[in-house]
Amino acid sequence: MCCILSLPCLYIWLNVLSPVNDVYQTAYKFGCYAMVFSCICELTAEAPAFVGQVFCFVKLKVILDTLHIFIRSVVFIVLVINNKNIAIYAFGIAQFTSCVTIILGNYGFFHIYIKRLKNYRDTLKKNDGDKEKTAKEAGPYYENMNDFPFTNISEMVPGVLKNSVSFHLAMIFFPVSELILSPHRPASLILISIN
């Protein structure tokens, strides 16, 4: 969906908006492509970001948002200080670098968290369900996570799922389509069958 929305935006940035000077044209094109590519790549981290919001990982959100802005700013400033003539290139590089930070931060956190949650659950079984003893051993971050459904980070990677009727379901998150299809339902998940 993001690809479909990004292409018209890219076309508008490059062809409809007021043109830039010929001196900056190549850098401007690079900046536009870098922005579109970053937006598309950053959407791969939406699944773990959504899981983080659903399960109230507020500190994760604050840390990753701060890191996102910090990395983008530092990369941009360092590149521009070293060469003032590449400011537009520096923006595109900084944007993509911060995008990679978001992706690695989200997936990295949940990779570690899921491993530790598995260890907590195993320890809880060994301790015959004694939550106090297990919380002392593993920490207090896992005791109320009985409804956390993920057992592997690969379950968060966007993909296609098979159902019992043996055709595929593709998940598309797009609230506008949901409003058009069903204005009374609050969920924005639409399942489309593909043969």
Image (cartoon, rainbow, N blue to C red):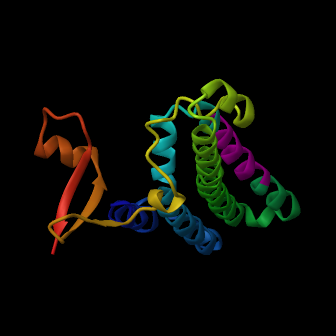
Pick the front one: 48 or 182: 48
| 136 or 47: nearer the viewer | 136
Task: Tell me what residue is drawn at x 28 percent, y 49 percent.
Answer: 174
Q: Magenta part of the protein: which range?
A: 62-74
Q: Main secondary structure of the magenta part?
A: helix
User: Is residue 181 magenta-colored?
Assistant: no
Look at the picture and state if 83 lies above or below 188. Answer: below
Q: Quadrant of residue 34?
A: bottom right
User: In the rendered view, would you say 58 is above or below 170?
Assistant: above
Front residue of this view, candidates 15 and 116: 116
In depth, the one of 188 and 157 nearer the eye is: 157
| Quadrant in the picture for the C terminus | bottom left
Q: In the drawing, does residue 33 fall left or right of residue 109?
A: left
Residue 38 image point, x, y percent: 55, 62
| Residue occupying image coordinates x 45% and y 59% | 155
Q: Residue at x 65, y 43 (%)?
A: 64
Q: Quadrant of the N terminus?
A: bottom left
Magenta includes 70? yes
**From the viewer's perspective, is 109 left or right of 80?**
left
Q: Residue furthest top?
A: 132
**Res 169 quadrant in image:** bottom left
| Left or right, 95 with reference to 175 | right
**Residue 105 placement (x, y as % from top left):** 65, 52
Across and down, in percent, residue 79 comes to: 81, 61
Q: Quadrant of residue 130?
A: top right
Query: In the rendered image, is residue 158 in sight?
Result: yes
Whole-percent x, y for residue 43 in the image: 47, 57
One can see residue 18 in this view: no
State the residue at coordinates (74%, 51%).
71
